[in-house]
Each structure stands twice: as C-alpha cells, then as structure tokens.
Image: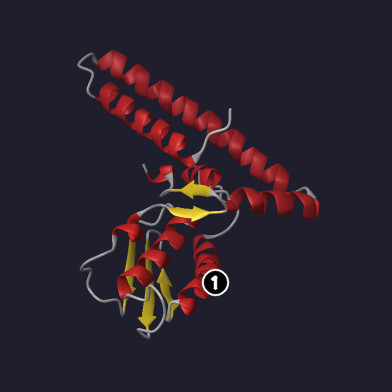
C-alpha cells in the first residue's frame, strides 16, 4: 500500500484520536488492555525497524546508500526518528537541510547560519540583505523552518536570531513545500 504525505498525516491523526478514545474509556481493564496492545505493537514494530536498519548498515556500500535514502524520505524519516533508529544524528540532518536551502536563500538575498542544536531545539541566524525576490525576513525564516522540519520532525522549536518579528506573511508562504512534484507537509511523526 503506497501512501502520500497527506494520507499518512490523516492516518496518524486517526490513530491519535483512537488513542485518546481508548485513554478515556471508563472500563479500566479495557483501557489497560488496549493500551498494552498498542504498546506491544509499537515494541514489535520498533524491534523490526531496528533490525532493518542494522541489516542495511552492515550490508556494505549498497546497504549504506539504501539506508541514507530511507533516512531522507519524509514518510520514513519520521518513523525512524519515532523509534530512535534514524541512521543520521540530528545535528547532521539539520546541517544538511541548511546546506540544501542555502542556494534558495542566496537567490532571495538571504543567508542562514546554524548556531546550535539540542535534543528538541534548533537555533539559527537568518540574515536578509533586502535584495532579491521574496526576500522578506519572514519568507527566509519560513524556508529555513520547512527545510529543518522535513528532516528533523523531532524538533519542537526553531529559534531564529536576526529575523524580524512575524508580521504579515503572504498566503503563498504558508502552503506546503513542493518538491519534485510531491507535496510534503510537516512530518506526521510529530503527532
């Protein structure tokens, strides 16, 4: 079954609603059994996903290449993060995302510098020369945030130094990013 990011997001929202319903059950035994079932499935999936990563990591250059490709896929990335088996450390993923967005920022008269990364917070400095198409500080900040969240769904906060406070943001700037003809939304794994 192939699923696009919108369908994936819808499924994760459905799961979240069902978990909330289960958590609200008045029957303590039913609630405990349902939550134990969910945890058992999560444990099983986590063990299998961990083993897949181990097998690919130990399969030479071809396995490493496949693992890297899986780690860059927006749907798979979130699951690898959820289970704690993403093959690339958070800071490295953030650095790569910033490298990929830099050409776009330069065209818009902007730049970005990574200041720091913690478990859930990324701090960047965004600068704008005011030259270039779409070069508002908010547009630059949004481009940086989208790039980071695509590869690091576990990030809860992106602190942007040097960006003006958010004011008017054009409607086209809040649409999901389009990449190679596919829509990407914030990773569903954040939910």
Q: Which residue is mark 1?
A: 99
Asked whether 102 or 35 is in front, the reply is 102
Q: Which residue is at a point 27% across and 28% down the rendered structure image?
A: 20
**Residue 173, image quadrant:** bottom left
Name the spot of residue 37 as percent of width and height, x first: 42, 21
Q: Is residue 104 above or below residue 86?
A: below
Q: Is residue 44 above or below residue 178?
A: above
Q: Which residue is at a point 50% across and 60% down the rendered structure image?
A: 90
Q: Is residue 143 above or below residue 63?
A: below
Q: Horizontally, is 51 left or right of 122 in the view?
A: right
Q: Horizontally, is 149 left or right of 54 in the view?
A: left
Asked whether 99 or 25 is in front, the reply is 99
Q: Horizontally, is 43 left or right of 123 in the view?
A: right
Name the spot of residue 155 as percent of width and height, x first: 39, 57
Quadrant containing the N terminus in the rendered view: top right
**Residue 16, image quadrant:** top left
Q: Horizontally, is 113 left or right of 136 in the view?
A: right
Q: Is residue 64 above or below residue 95?
A: above
| Image mark count | 1
Name the spot of residue 106 as percent of width and height, x first: 48, 79
SS of the residue under disc 1? helix
Quadrant containing the C terminus in the rendered view: top left
Q: Which residue is at a point 78% across and 51% down the rendered structure image?
A: 62
Asked whether 186 or 39 is in front, the reply is 186
Name the spot of residue 128 as percent of width and height, x first: 37, 82
- Crowding around mark 1 (Cα neighbors within 10 Å: few <14, some 14 to 19, many 20+) is some
Tell me how the rendering is colored: secondary structure
């Amino acid at each position: 079954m192939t699923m696009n990011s919108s369908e994936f997001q819808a499924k994760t929202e459905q799961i979240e609603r069902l978990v909330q319903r289960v958590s609200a059950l008045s029957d303590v035994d039913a609630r405990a059994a349902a939550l134990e079932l969910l945890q058992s499935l999560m444990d099983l999936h986590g063990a299998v996903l961990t083993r897949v990563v181990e097998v690919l990591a130990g399969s030479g250059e071809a396995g490493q290449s496949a693992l890297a490709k899986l780690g860059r896929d927006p749907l798979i990335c979130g699951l690898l993060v959820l289970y704690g088996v993403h093959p690339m450390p958070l800071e490295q993923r953030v650095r790569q995302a910033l490298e990929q967005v830099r050409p776009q920022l330069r065209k818009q008269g902007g730049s970005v510098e990574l200041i720091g990364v913690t478990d859930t917070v990324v701090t960047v400095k965004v600068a704008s020369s005011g030259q270039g198409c779409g070069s508002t500080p908010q547009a630059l900040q949004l481009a940086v945030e989208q790039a980071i969240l695509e590869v690091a769904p576990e990030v809860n906060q992106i602190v942007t130094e040097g960006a003006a406070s958010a004011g008017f943001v054009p409607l086209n700037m809040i649409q999901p990013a389009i990449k190679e003809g596919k829509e990407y939304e914030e990773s569903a794994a954040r939910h």
